[in-house]
Image: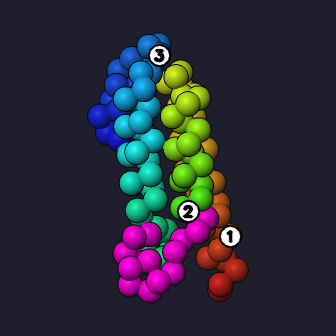
């Protein structure tokens, strides 16, 4: 994801090719989907407790699914990922407040 983000930031006016969009989507899925907020890391939480952070997984997959076909424009691609990060944060914030 870092290499694809570097390409996007260095050339914000260039149309993203498919491999860069795939790198952004795949990196987002691995990074955001594999880490967790209040529950620890997503993969480790699932492995240790059998509990899967469902909102995080769904939102991560949706963002990656949208970035790949729609994210030819670098700003659109990063915007989709930013919206995904905000949605994950809001979903997990509301979950953590409901357990208090």
The C terminus: image quadrant: bottom right
The residue that label 1 is drawn on is: 94
Counting from the top left corner in percent of width and height, residue 47 is at 38, 79
* Magenta highlight on residue 33: no
Picture layout, residue 62 above or below residue 22? below
Counting from the top left corner in percent of width and height, residue 62 is at 60, 49
Counting from the top left corner in percent of width and height, residue 56 is at 55, 62
Label 3 or label 1, whichever comes before in sequence order: 3
Q: Residue furthest left?
A: 3
**Numbered mark located on residue 56 in the image:** 2
Counting from the top left corner in percent of width and height, residue 58 is at 59, 59
Picture layout, residue 23 above or below residue 93? above
For the residue pair 37 and 33, the one nearer the viewer reads as 33
Q: Main secondary structure of the magenta part?
A: helix
Q: How is the image coloured?
A: rainbow
Who's the residue at 39% across and 17% down the image?
11
Label 3 or label 2, whichever comes before in sequence order: 3
Badge 2: residue crowd in 10 Å (few <14, some 14–19, many ≥20): many
Label pair 3/2, CB-CB below 8 angstroms: no
Picture layout, residue 61 above or below residue 82? below
Label 2 or label 1, whichever comes before in sequence order: 2
The N terminus: image quadrant: top left
Who's the residue at 62% across and 76% down the image?
96
Who's the residue at 51% across and 34% down the image?
68
- Alpha carbon distance from label 2 to label 1: 12 Å
Badge 3: residue crowd in 10 Å (few <14, some 14–19, many ≥20): some
For the residue pair 22 and 6, the one nearer the viewer reads as 22
Which residue range is magenta in the image?
41-56
**Numbered mark located on residue 15 in the image:** 3
**Mark count:** 3
């Amino acid at each position: 994801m870092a290499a694809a983000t570097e390409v996007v930031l260095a050339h914000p006016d260039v149309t993203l090719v498919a491999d860069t969009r795939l790198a952004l989507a795949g990196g987002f899925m691995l990074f955001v989907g594999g880490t967790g907020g209040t529950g620890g890391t997503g993969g480790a939480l699932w492995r240790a407790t059998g509990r899967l952070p469902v909102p995080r997984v769904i939102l991560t997959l949706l963002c990656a699914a949208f970035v790949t076909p729609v994210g030819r424009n670098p700003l659109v691609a990063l915007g989709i990922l930013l919206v995904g990060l905000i949605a994950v944060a809001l979903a997990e914030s509301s979950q953590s407040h409901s357990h208090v």
